[in-house]
Structures are given as structure tokens and as C-alpha cells.
Amino acid sequence: MSYKLHIENVSKQYAGTYALTPTSLTVNDGEFITIVGPSGCGKSTLFNIVSGVLSPTQGTVAIDGNDVTNAPGHVGYMMQKDLLLPWKSTFENILLGISLTRKPTEQEKTQAAALATRYGLGPFLNNFPHTMSGGMRQRAAFLRTLMFNKDVLLLDEPFGALDSQTRFSMQQWLLNVWNDQRRTILFITHDVEEAVFLADRVVVMSPRPGKVEKIIPIELERPRERGILTSQSFISYKRQILDLIYNDPERSEHE
Ligand SMILES: Nc1ncnc2c1ncn2[C@@H]1O[C@H](COP(=O)(O)OP(=O)(O)OP(=O)(O)O)[C@@H](O)[C@H]1O
Ligand SMILES: [Mg+2]
């Protein structure tokens, strides 16, 4: 299979201390990757490097075989605190990434409205963020990322602030969009259940300074419905990842 993104031996040091130890990861076209790991292990640092906004201390990033290290503008990136501007409407916020650099074209405006309508924000196009729920705001922020029309999307804890029910409906919403749009997604989360539910593969990172500890392919059928959350195979993936995160030697001895 052809790969979309190749991260090779990327690391970051601040004042001689590693924030991210050399990390490699190859992602296939159209794949959904989730990344879990303790706070401070370098997940956002990795995304900043892949997006080209942060210079790695060493290593390279390639998309479609082209070196894009230190070169912004090749991925859609929803940062950890990606907020909507409170004085702009949903429609304007979705177009914001474009309108920061130039005037959006009529075609882009039409695309923004069409995306919003297709993905459930149609009635809220003229609403301001404070009049919308947390889930709606996250959708708008995500659609803004989608508007960049990049094949690779980096999503840094996009649903972190949502309650578990809203979060679950957002996960299903996102899988639906991903299925429609055929993008390649890398998604950071602290929630192991979310990581398993969404992913083709889960990347587990070790504590600070982080590196890729293990990559676990999730062989659950798609489309993923609520029922799989309580299936034996889902629970055993979850346990495997929790054991890695908490580094539980007792359990490994028994198994
Ligand atoms: N500009 C900086 N200068 C110095 N150290 C930094 C800088 N940015 C990040 N770090 C350090 O790099 C490490 C990794 O940070 P990063 O934000 O990538 O972690 P993270 O895995 O995304 O954590 P979280 O889950 O809390 O978001 C942390 O120890 C952090 O303190
Ligand atoms: Mg982070």
C-alpha cells in the first residue's frame, strides 16, 4: 500500500533536554491513526513538527514522498486550543483559515455553507459561538480545518472538553465525515476508549520524554456502532493499551 505520511526519526530538544525523543511513524493513505500517551510526552510537539510550524532538532517529515520538514501549509491542523472567534459567525469562523490570508472566493463560500449544511450546522450558519453548544463549536472548528482541502488532518484532542455523551456523538459524526471525505487523520486523545473506537491503528507513546512505545492495529469492523464498545475484542484492546500506559508489570507476568 502506498503511504501518505512518513515521519522519520523526528525529535525535539529544548535547552538540551528532549521534549520528544526520535520518533518514526508511517501512515497509509486514508488511514485513521489515534495517538495516546501521558501529558507532556510530546504529542502536540509531534503535531507541531509534522505541520511545519515547529522545527525538529533532527529528522524529516514527508508527504506523498516529498520532504515537507519545516514547511507549513501541507496539512490541516486543529490545534489543542483551537478556538472560534467569538465575534464571528459560524460561517465566518469556518472560512477563517482562508480569510486570514485573503478574501474567500465565491466557490469557497459555497463550499463552506455546503459543508456546514451537510454536517449538521446549516441552521447555525449565522450564529455566534456563545449561542452554540460545545459540540457544535467543535464541529465548526473541525470544518474550518477541513476547508483547507488538505489530504492529511491533524486533530489535537478535538473533543477533550466535551461530556461523554456529546463526545460519543461527535466521534460517530467524525467517522461519518472521514468516510465521506477520505482524508488521512491523525488524532490525539487522552481517552483510550475514544482511541480504540476511532482508529485503524493506535499509537501508544511512553512518558516524557516521549517516543512511540507500541503501535496496535485495531481489527474491528466498520462502520463502528455503539454495540462494539462492550464487545470482548474492544475491551481486550482497551486493556492492552491501559496496561501499556500504566506499565502494569503484574498483569504482564500473569498473561
Ligand atoms: N516552547 C517550549 N519550551 C520548552 N519546553 C517545551 C516547550 N514546548 C513544550 N515543551 C515541553 O515539551 C514537552 C512535551 O510537550 P507537549 O505539549 O508536546 O506534550 P503533550 O504530550 O501534548 O501533553 P498534553 O497531553 O498535556 O497536551 C513538555 O515537557 C513541555 O513542557
Ligand atoms: Mg498536547
Image (spheres, rainbow, N blue to C red):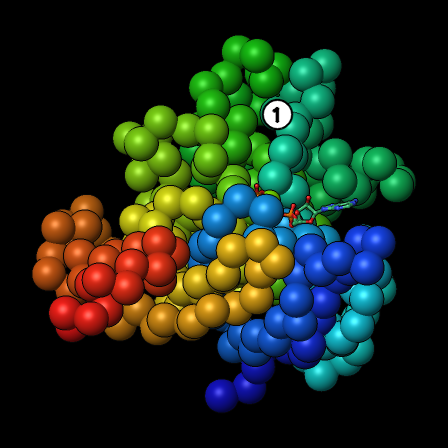
Q: Residue at left 65%, top 26%?
A: 84
Which quadrant does the C terminus fall into? Answer: bottom left
The residue tagged with tag 1: helix, strand or loop?
helix
Say which residue label 1 marks: 90
Asked if the residue at label 1 sits under 8 Å from ligand 2, the reply is no
Rendered location of residue 181, percent (x, y):
50, 59
Task: Identify which residue is drawn at 58% across, 54% down.
Answer: 208
Residue at x 49% of width, y 61% of height: 205
Seen from the viewer's position, the closer of residues 214 and 140 is 214
- Answer yes or no: is residue 154 visible: no
Could you tell me if residue 41 is visible in this image?
yes
Mark 1, other Cα within 10 Å: few <14 / some 14–19 / many ≥20: many
Residue 185 is left or right of residue 24, and the answer is left
Residue extending furthest toward the bottom: 1
Q: Is residue 100 left or right of residue 160?
A: right
Query: Vertical placement of 145 versus 167: above or below?
Result: below
Quarter occupied by residue 240: bottom left
Asked if residue 184 lies left or right of residue 171, the reply is right
Residue at the spot 75% in from the left edge and 40% down from the top edge: 97
Number of numbered discs present?
A: 1
